Amino acid sequence: MRTGDYKQTYGELVALVDSPPVWLWSAVLVLALIAAPHVLNSYALSLLTVILITATGALGLNILTGYTGLISLGHVGFLVTGAYAYAVLVAKYQMHPLIGLLGAGVVPAAASLVVGAPSLRLKGLYLAITTLAFSFIINTAILEMRWLTNGARGISVQRPQMFGVSFDGDAAFTYLCLAIATLTLFATLNIRRSRVGRAFVAIRDNDTAARVMGINLHAYKLLAFVTSAFITGIAGALYGLYLSFVSVEGFPFLLSIEALAILIVGGLGSALGAVLGTILIGLLPEATRIILGLFSAQMDALFTTGAQELKSMLYGLVIILFLRFQPRGLVGAWHDIRRTWVHWPLRY
Amino acid sequence: MQYLLQLLISGLAIGAIYGLIAMGFAVIYKSTGLVNFAQGEMTMITAYVAWTISTTVSGNVFVVAIGAILAAVVLGLVIERVVMRPMLGEPVFATVMVTIGLAVILRSAINFIWDAYPHGLDVGMGRGIAHLGGIGVRTGQIAVIVTLLLLLAAIWAFFRYSKIGVAMRAVAADDRTALLMGISAKKVHALAWAASSVISGIGGVFFALSYDLSPAMFQLGLKAFPATILGGLDAVLGSGLGGLLIGITENLAGGYIGSGTKEVAGFAMIIVVLMVRPFGIFGERDIERV
């Protein structure tokens, strides 16, 4: 019988996964995802692409809100900055797409230094409000800088061609998103188990204590902002490519809420949670449509007329219900199930 | 000069509406310690109910006013009882996120129940134009400024002299001690939500009267945010005055710099305020003990 979760060396504590079968299952999942574009129809494939892009963005926000505990209500600002950085560099100045992707990370990261600066003095709600203000200011700035961004008309972007491979087709583009999402997942998991990640979590848990332990609050808070904005910006560029058109309307404020909902539903402060939350929130509208459709055609009709409203109502409802009944999110539920399974018939 | 005065007066009028909604924020913050992100949506529902009453029941000012106030009270009480009370004792982050979820639900519910077209609220007055020293002002705009000032005085007196007002301040200052003194925190919270809903609802109805009802009205809540930050989240009177300041700033920026800046003048201002004096002009400083 397993009597505990023994970790005897420091290496075991910071290992990427704590049991070897996880590697096997992850490999199976990756293979399934690689096979997916050849099996799925184009609608399911576009859903998968959106989920992969959203997961990248959610992992970005997770570094800031999940690990470091700094709430951001304005992450859509970084998303839209990244999308515009890519569009301007590649579509307007004909740069290499790889430079475009890099720029989509670097420009929001630079912008995040401006937003991050107030965070050195502010906490909690006040910071949330500052980031909210930032996302509105960014939108206005983009609309006003017509010489660079075409203002309200937006910029249309082509899917890139890199290293002799064209990412124009849906399957190829899904592979690009899959590669970036996987890289991001590994990057955030590795950040979490490094010295930097431990500093982030220490700041989240108690910033005064963290400071007393010698963690440079200013440097690490700014680092969290920069890393988070970099990843989110790249997700924004991918989303712009997915829409093949970058405009302010393509990135509504609701996306910020959706990102927070994903983290809450998945379980705050866990990369696995961000991924699980993305899957749940991404499939929620579809699942509801199918379930309602089972009951009657009338409900199905309701869904087509008021799809946008019902979708946002569902987000709201899911946020409230999870906070009320499962504050630790899907990851918490998974841990409970796993513990019950391992220790059965004992309770713990 | 004429142009400046015109900007100032219309700034005061929209600022008074921001002020009313900002007071709604502050009343809830002061007694429960929460920022209610659904304030704009609650404002909007009250305004839509007022419009429905004016078109279906009667366009009489008093009928509409009483109906709207009752609706606002019921809305505040229901939200407090159904959504917020189960979250009592949970971390602030979770509770604030619940209000964000609530905001999203209410906003879509409004689009679902009422249509997406703009409507004008017509109660037979408030749209006429009065002339003050050569400047045309809508009577509705004068009325909202007067209402704000009257409410400011009434709320000041309420918190200063009435037993319930003192109880609310006590709960805000230290809810455990207040409980030990025999104050029911639940009732105080319910009262705060109802009062906040009414105060911001009045702002919403005046907005519908002077401008138009539309699904984009929830942005009033976001616009009133800077006002309450400027005045201090825990300062009800300060928030009301902060609204006037934000309204004037917005209009001056829109009139002299460019129409795009009008939308973000308030936000740019709060970033500065938060950097310099995070607790607002009239708010109390948080002192953190280790």
Image (cartoon, coloured by chain):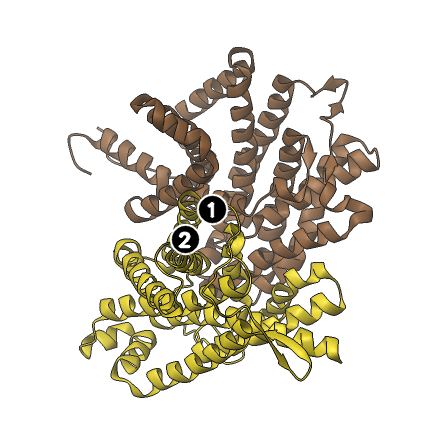
Residue in the foreground of this view, choosing between B89 and A306: A306
Residue in the foreground of this view, choosing between A66 and A344: A66
Q: Mark 2 — on which chain does it sit?
A: B
State the image coordinates of residue A129 (x, y, percent, origin top left).
53, 61
Q: At numbered mark 2, what does the secondary structure look like: helix, strand or loop?
A: helix
Q: Which mark is residue B160?
A: none
Task: Name the quadrant of the N terminus of chain A.
Answer: top left
Chain appearing in brown on the rendered image: A
State the image coordinates of residue B29 (x, y, percent, origin top left).
39, 69
Q: At numbered mark 1, what does the secondary structure look like: helix, strand or loop?
A: helix
Query: Is the residue at mark 1 from the same chain as the one at mark 2?
Result: no
Q: Residues within 10 Å of mark 2 (few under 14, many from 20)?
A: many
State the image coordinates of residue A326 (x, y, percent, origin top left).
31, 44
The amino acid type found where label 2 is placed reads Met
Chain appearing in yellow on the rendered image: B
Q: Is residue A48 left or right of residue A319?
A: right
Q: Mark 1 — on which chain does it sit?
A: A
Residue A122 appears in view: no
Residue in the foreground of this view, choosing between A205 and B262: B262
**Which quadrant holds residue A149?**
top right
* Position above or below: B43 against A157: below
For the point 44% across and 72% down, which residue is it?
B23
Q: Which residue is mark 2?
A: B97
* Position above or below: B260 against A28: below
Q: CA distance from mark 1 to mark 2?
A: 9 Å
Q: Which residue is mark 1?
A: A260
For the point 60% across and 22% down, which residue is it?
A174
Task: Name the quadrant of the C terminus of chain A.
Answer: top left
The amino acid type found where label 1 is placed reads Leu
Check contact, mark 1 vs mark 2: CB within 8 A.
Answer: yes
